[in-house]
Image: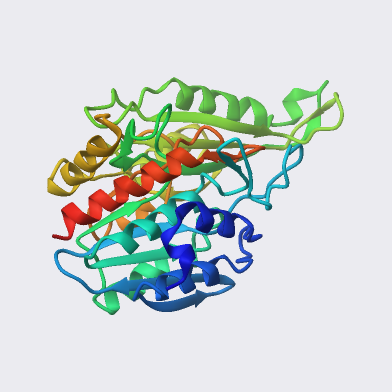
Amino acid sequence: MNPLALDPVALARALVRCHSVTPADGGAQGVLSHALEGLGFVVTRLRFGDIENFFAERPGPGPHLCFAGHTDVVPPGEGWAHDPFAAEELQGIIYGRGAVDMKGSIAAFTAAVAAVPGHVSFLITGDEEGEAVDGTVKVLEWMQTARKIPDFCVVGEPTSQARLGDVVKVGRRGSLNARITMPGRQGHAAYPHLADNAVHKLVPLLAELAAVKLDEGNAFFPPSSLQITTVDVGNPVTNVIPGLATAGLNIRFNDQHSGASLTAWLREVVDRHAAEAELGVKISGEAFLTRPGPEIEILTSAISAVTGITPERNTAGGTSDARFIARYCPVAEFGLVGATMHKVNEAVPIQDLLQLTEVYKTLVGAFCR
């Protein structure tokens, strides 16, 4: 047996040392798959495009529990006090890119399943921090064809806020990005009757969109939010009326909407202001919610038993790969405190890593019995 599989601290440090900035793998999945094979998992490597992924499964008693995660990380940036890929340990804290998001959780997954029997699988991708096209989406398609869809999936994203165990994500808002291109007719600023100012046409449209209150929220989600993210003209001079103006906006929406319904609403508003305007829409993910049920109760009970905290169940934050998994089975997210994720000097306390391992261990024992 690979000793790394038994020690979440050693495995987390080994994974952090891998330079796995999306789309590079940097050897991370080899480190992890070797550890899992030593625990009796059958690892199926699944490369799509330039992305390394794998599915690993260990048969056992009880329902099928899947742990999902990503080995890719965002670029480290500048200004670190420690080498971001050295996994330095100082005063009980491990520093490094991915320590929290989410190589630490993956290490805790592995050490947990080493200690407890059960039917467990791993869905590991290298494309969560990137375009999310050749990762979890395609692995899930493969899993469905191979009849490997689990009964419940836990994603190890850093959901905790102030203290390990205080938050479980039971859903996420959807995300829609739109770009409006407003045509006009360029002309001299002193002769506006000979031109058609694209900005003057765009501004009232944006004002109407910004003034709309999409909903009041509900018991599981906050109100949906539309934010104008950019307005661009590119006019380098002061005496030219612009003939083209563009704007970008983002909508984070709850389960009272869909990407299609919001697109239709945007199209109606744009057409009413200027039928000649172009609207481009990209939906990064739909809103989803795992409603209260036995799976969530087992997870929250495991968290409470180990941490002494009753976790809040919420849907805040951005998107994650859970939005894809929700199409196939119940899913929740639970992991480390996310205060340093994506930041310079990302770090995880060793005590949190050990406690998270105990939570996952308790979960496997309760769910797979």
Residue 252 placement (x, y as % from top left):
42, 36
| Residue 168 or residue 201, whichever sits in front | 168
Residue 5 placement (x, y as % from top left):
43, 64
Q: Quarter of the image holding residue 203?
A: top right
Q: Quarter of the image holding residue 226?
A: top left
Q: How many marks?
A: 0
* Residue 34 visible at all: yes
Residue 137 placement (x, y as % from top left):
40, 64
Question: Residue drawn 85% across and 32% down?
Answer: 236
| Residue 226 or residue 240, whichever sits in front | 226
Which quarter of the rendered picture does the C terminus lie within?
bottom left
Q: Quarter of the image holding residue 247?
A: top right
* Residue 246 visible at all: no
Residue 72 placement (x, y as % from top left):
56, 58
Horizontal arrangement in the rendering, residue 14 relative to residue 363 (left or right): right
Question: Residue drawn 48% across and 50% down?
Answer: 104
